[in-house]
Structure formats: C-alpha cells, structure tokens
C-alpha cells in the first residue's frame, strides 16, 4: 500500500519548517528549530538553550560555557591558552561568521526540525604553524546530543558513541560540560573536510534515536552502508532494527586446525553447541599475525591450498551452516614484500606513509654504509613521543622511522647526522632490506624515509588515495566472504595523523553492504560504525563473556572446574553480558579439535556453559547485585596500583540443574589467610 501525504499533513510540515529560523538582533543571534532554540550573544557566547516542548532551559545560566573558541599553548609561560572569538554575525541566513582581529571562521548552518548542523567551511587567519585547535563547549543541566559529522571533528570518548548519555526523570547531579573539538585544525589538508557537528536536545531515549536517525539520513557527510537503494528514513529505520536483531545474541568460538577438514570440524562443533559465530585469527586465515606474504589478504596456503578459491569456499561453508564469520585483521597494514605497493617494477608506491623525502647528493656504491641526501624544504627529524602528539613533526613511539628507500633499494639507518643542515647524513646498518637488490645509486635518485608501525609493516599515507583504496578493497572482501564481524586490531597503524584511525573506519564503513559488527584494538567498535551510535543499539547489543579452556603446559595448569565460572559470573552480574562461546584465554585464543579431545573436562564445561546461558536470561536485579558485591578491585599494595579492570572474589558461583529447576551454588574454597589471594581473571 502506498503512503499518500494529505493536505493537512502538508500544512503541518510547512508549519514545522516555518518555525525554523536564524535571526540576528543587535545583541544576539537566534537559531531555532521546532524542538529547541539556541541563542548566542553578540560576542558568540551561549546565552540560552531552551527546549521548546517543556520550556526547559538546558544551559547552566550562571556558567553557560564558552561556545566557540580557539585553544593552544602560550609558549612564553608554557601554559594552555584560550583565544576567544569575540564577534559573531549571521550572513545569508545560513552562515555564521566568528572572528577575532585577523582570525575568521565561517560555518554553514543546516537548520532542521529537530537538530542543528554546523559545518566549518572556511578558516582564515589561523596558520597551521600555530597548532591551534577549535572547540565548541556548552555547560548544560540536562542531557543533549552532540554528534561529529566527519572524522575531522572529535567528541570526547569516541567518534559518535552515545557518550554514556542517560535519560532519567531527575536532572544530572551536577552541570555537564559537553564539547566537540576540531583537534586537527592545525593539521588540515585540502583532501579532507574541515569538520562539523550536529546538536539535538531530546527529552527521551527514543527521541534521541529518532533525531539521530534523521541526522544520519539528511547529512551527506555521514557514511552510509553500500546498499543499492535510496537512504531514506524508512530504509534507515528498517536497517537499524535489522542490525540490532542480527547482533543481539552473538555466541562466538575462535577456531583453528591442522587442515581445512579440521576447520570444518570446528564449524560443525559450533553448530552442535548452539554457537552462532566462528572467528578466525590472522595466524589461521592468513598464516601469521603480521602480513608476511605478497599481499595482506592472501589466505594461508597450509589451510587453503587453492588460495582465495579455497578460502571463499570455506566462507560459503560457514555461511551455509547459518553461522556468522568473524575475522581478525591488522587494519590493512601492508607487507614488506607486497607486490602491489612495495615491490613493484616502478619501486615503492609514493602513497606509503612517510616522514621525509629528498634526493641523493653523492654517488653511492654497492657496499657504502653512509649516504648524503638533501631533504625537501621544511623537513625535520621528528620527535617520537609515548602516546602524545607534541607538535606537527611528532609521532607516537610505536612508529619506527629508520627504514629508507633509495630508489628501489630498502636500507636501515643506524644514525642520523647533520639533520639541522641542508644536507643530511645517514649512517646505514643494513642494505638490501626486504629482498631488495643491493646496488649502486646515482646523485638525484629519490630518497624516502617511512613511518612503519611497530617496525613491522608499511601503511598508507592518510592523505593519499591509497587509504581509500585499502578501505574499498577490504570492504569488498568482507562483502564477498560474508564477514559479519570485523576485528580491526592494530587500528593505530593509521596514526600518522591524529584523525587517521577515524578516517579509515569512516571510509571502510561506506563499502560494507551488509550487517556487520566490529571491534578494534581499543576494545570499542571501529570509528563511524554508525549503528553503535544509537541508544537502542547500546541497550540491546550487550557485551559477550566467554568460558576459558586451556591445556596444561609449562607455567600454566589446565583449566579447572572452578575458574571457568569466575569471569562469567562477574560479567553477567555487572554488565548483563551475553554468555557466548568458549575460547583459549591467551593469544591466539583459538581452539582446535585436538584441544577439545585432550582436555578431560571439555564436555562438562560445555554443559555448564549452556546452563549459564539459560540462567543469565532469568536472573533478577537483586541476584545480580548479590553476585557483583563479591567482586572487588585487585590492589597491589607494593606497587600502589589499583587494577580496577581485573577483580577478584572469594566466592565461585557454579550453575546447577535439578528436578526443581536451575540455580547457582556459591562455593568458597579453603584458603590460608594472608597467603592465598582470591580468584581473578588475567589478561593476555
């Protein structure tokens, strides 16, 4: 049945859009939607944020926040410095101009019935050398929604997640500071957007999601799945509902085997044990943690002798059994001998991530261990900082900068000399890296110094077309092979620029044509995996807890009948976790047919796993609180360290089944006071 729009409905829609306005008066600028009104004073400072449905002022009027301002460092005092944008004006009804002396920022405003979108369009008088960032900040007494519209805008905690927003009847106990930042305003590039955000002021969780859905549909800067139909509100709503159903109850087992038949045996085992997802780690499907072959998507020849054909057939086998397939990856980093981008007839692809380029000054013979080259103007030896970007020529310390290419030959640098001069000297420790030919070189040959994550691989320059090519290649690979959960371990390999990780996730999402879930090295979904932004998703797609199983080896006893319950009980009680599958609790986390056969209690563990799954779905809040109360943070007194993420307990909760039903039996094992510690879960 086709839906028709009646005359009254058209009138209602027209009335809604007539309520949208942008207006400037002598002392204020007003931006009004049908649901809220945002007012700035003439200096651009927030004056009011009124929710119209209940006439609720959302700002803390005693301290409403700073609005838009520039933020940097006072080099004289070595203290943070804020630079206010002291004038705001409205132009053409949809342009906000903020300026201060010679600095001028222009925003395009999109006023919609339930939200405002701000896009930074022009930046004048803010040199990149000043390392300034831009912020927008509000102090609110009720919850609001702030959503980055692309990877150049950052909101604390993650790119677009719900940020812990709760919609209670009572207001927050204290004023909340809500902020979005243009963290990389100083690192802007013509191939990247300048950044933007959307603001909404919902009353309820449902209203939050409905407005966010409109933002996702209306704003072209947000990524959409690669489906072959128009991205309308109706399509997006159905997609989100389907995605939530698809990801609500995921029970995973990580598998391995000596051959393809054993892999299929583990798939059949997953079906038998009512699991619905199998996971392949990189060392299984690709044959190593880091890519070592000629291409990062080439399957492991020991398990898939016919290469891509065998791997695709295995993926079809998993899919045909009604299972999901989860794949661990290293975020499309590039092998040292990759035939497409490293070992090409023309030499290394110029789009690989690098930190310096130049040309050779003197001839270099085949056995020379010292070269002189002239770097491009403005080049400098970078500062390598642990977890901090302390300037425009600085990188995280997990990047290595010692590998260079002279023409087609790769070399390793032992010492950098004269880097304060026009001509640098490089003392070499090795020639002919990565099976490249050790040869002589003539003056004028190209010299390139690379950024190599963990000194293991190459990666794409974030501001080149290569990063999009990699995202497209991997997205299409996931589509072809029915990959439903994408583990982007090592997402930090794109950390050449602060926005690189978010950019890769943003690009990858646009090439996925089916429901997917994701994980990353931070433990969160990949940036701009849009479905995770919604409250309905965070409420229904709960964390998953697994049961450990490991064989005895040097330094580690086999999993015993008690420790298997420690983590499950805690996560079910504290996080309402889904009881998933079974896995080895240490890298590389996979189980094989031999491990299941050789652990004498594996069948018992599986039976108890099924009991936990049934019990977890029926526990009351009071029962969860009782169990959670027995867990407490590990405190290492000698180190003054509170390991709050790893908790210990003196009580083991064991599931039991009787004629009367299911119950949890508390067990307390004998301990020696002051000697024995409680039960806990470890970490890889």
Image (cartoon, helix red, strand yellow):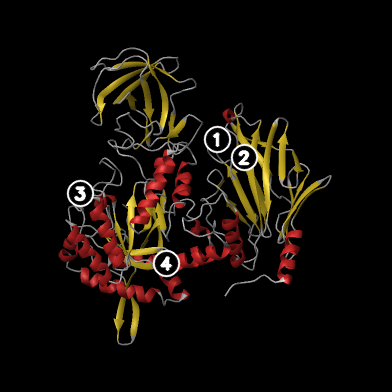
Residue drawn at (71%, 50%) of the image: 64
Q: Is residue 201 visible?
A: yes
Of 456 and 64, which appears nearest the observer? 456
Of 268 and 145, which appears nearest the observer? 268
Secondary structure at numbered mark 1: loop
Q: Is residue 666 visible?
A: no
Classify 664 as above or below 397.
below
Q: Which residue is mark 3?
A: 301
Q: Which residue is mark 2?
A: 134
> Quarter of the image holding residue 5?
bottom right
Alpha-carbon span between mark 4 and mark 1: 39 Å
Give yes or no for contact between labels 4 and 3 (Cβ–Cβ under 8 Å): no
* Residue 41 coordinates in the image, percent (x, y): 77, 46
Q: Which mark is residue 190?
A: 1
- Disc 1 or 3, which lies upstream in sequence? 1
Alpha-carbon span between mark 2 and mark 4: 39 Å
Q: Which mark is residue 246?
A: 4
Q: Nearer the viewer, mark 2 or mark 4?
A: 4
Could you tell me which quadrant the N terminus lies in? bottom right
Residue drawn at (23%, 55%) of the image: 310
Classify 79 as above or below 161.
above
């Amino acid at each position: 049945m086709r839906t028709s729009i009646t005359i009254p409905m058209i009138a209602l829609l027209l009335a809604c859009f007539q309520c949208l306005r942008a207006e400037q008066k002598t002392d204020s600028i007003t931006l009004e939607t049908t649901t809220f009104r945002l007012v700035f004073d003439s200096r651009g400072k927030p004056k009011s944020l009124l929710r119209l449905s209940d006439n609720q002022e959302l700002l803390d009027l005693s301290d409403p926040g700073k609005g838009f301002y520039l933020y940097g460092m006072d080099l004289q005092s070595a203290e943070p410095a804020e630079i206010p944008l002291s004038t705001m004006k409205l132009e053409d009804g949809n342009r906000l101009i903020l300026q201060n002396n010679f600095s001028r920022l222009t925003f395009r405003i999109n006023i919609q019935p339930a939200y405002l979108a701000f896009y930074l369009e022009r930046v004048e008088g803010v040199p990149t050398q000043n390392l300034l960032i831009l912020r927008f900040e509000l102090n609110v007494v009720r919850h609001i929604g702030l959503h980055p519209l692309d990877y150049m805008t950052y909101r604390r905690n993650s790119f677009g997640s719900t940020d812990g927003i709760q919609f209670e009847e009572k207001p927050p106990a204290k004023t909340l500071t809500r902020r979005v930042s243009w963290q990389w305003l100083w690192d802007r590039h013509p191939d990247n957007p300048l950044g933007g955000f959307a603001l909404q002021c919902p009353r309820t969780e449902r209203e939050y999601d409905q407005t966010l859905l409109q933002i996702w549909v209306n704003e072209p800067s947000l990524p959409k799945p690669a489906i072959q139909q128009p991205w309308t509100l109706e399509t997006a709503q159905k997609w989100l509902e389907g995605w939530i159903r698809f990801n609500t109850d995921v029970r995973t087992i990580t598998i391995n085997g000596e051959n393809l038949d054993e892999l299929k045996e583990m798939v059949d085992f997953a079906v038998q044990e009512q699991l619905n997802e199998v996971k392949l780690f990189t060392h299984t499907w690709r044959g190593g943690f880091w890519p070592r072959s000629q291409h990062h998507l080439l399957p492991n020849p020991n398990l898939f002798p016919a290469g891509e054909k065998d791997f695709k057939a295995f993926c079809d086998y998993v899919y045909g059994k009604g299972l999901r397939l989860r794949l661990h990856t290293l975020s499309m980093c590039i092998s040292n001998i990759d035939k497409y981008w490293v070992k090409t007839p023309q030499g290394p692809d110029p789009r690989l991530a690098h930190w310096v380029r130049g040309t050779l000054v003197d001839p270099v013979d085949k056995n020379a261990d010292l070269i002189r080259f002239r770097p491009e103007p403005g080049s400098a030896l970078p500062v390598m900082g642990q977890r901090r970007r302390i300037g425009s020529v600085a990188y995280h310390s997990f990047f290595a900068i010692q590998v260079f290419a002279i023409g087609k030959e790769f070399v390793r640098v032992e010492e950098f000399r004269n880097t304060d001069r026009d001509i640098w000297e490089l003392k070499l420790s090795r020639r002919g890296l990565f099976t490249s030919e050790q040869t002589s070189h003539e003056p004028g040959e190209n010299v390139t110094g690379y950024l190599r994550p963990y000194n293991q691989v190459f990666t794409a320059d974030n501001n080149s077309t290569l990063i999009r090519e990699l995202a497209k290649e991997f997205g299409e690979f996931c589509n072809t092979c029915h990959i439903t959960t994408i583990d982007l371990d090592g997402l930090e390999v794109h950390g050449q620029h602060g926005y690189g990780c978010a950019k890769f996730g943003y690009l990858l999402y646009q090439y996925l044509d089916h429901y997917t879930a994701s994980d990353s090295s931070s433990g969160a979904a990949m940036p701009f995996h849009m479905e995770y932004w919604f409250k309905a998703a965070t409420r229904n797609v709960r964390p998953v807890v697994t049961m450990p199983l490991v064989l005895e080896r040097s330094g580690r006893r086999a999993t015993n009948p008690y420790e298997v319950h420690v983590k499950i009980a805690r996560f079910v009680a504290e996080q309402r976790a889904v009881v998933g599958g079974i896995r080895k609790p240490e890298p590389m986390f996979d189980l094989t047919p031999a491990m299941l056969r050789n652990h004498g209690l594996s069948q018992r563990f599986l039976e108890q796993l099924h009991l936990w799954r049934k019990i977890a779905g029926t526990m009351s809040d009071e029962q969860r609180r009782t169990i959670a109360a027995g867990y407490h943070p590990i405190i290492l007194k000698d180190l003054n360290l509170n390991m709050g993420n790893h908790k210990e307990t003196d009580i083991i909760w064991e599931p039991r089944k009787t004629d009367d039903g299911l119950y949890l039996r508390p067990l307390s094992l004998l301990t020696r006071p002051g000697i024995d510690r409680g039960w806990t879960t470890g970490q890889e």
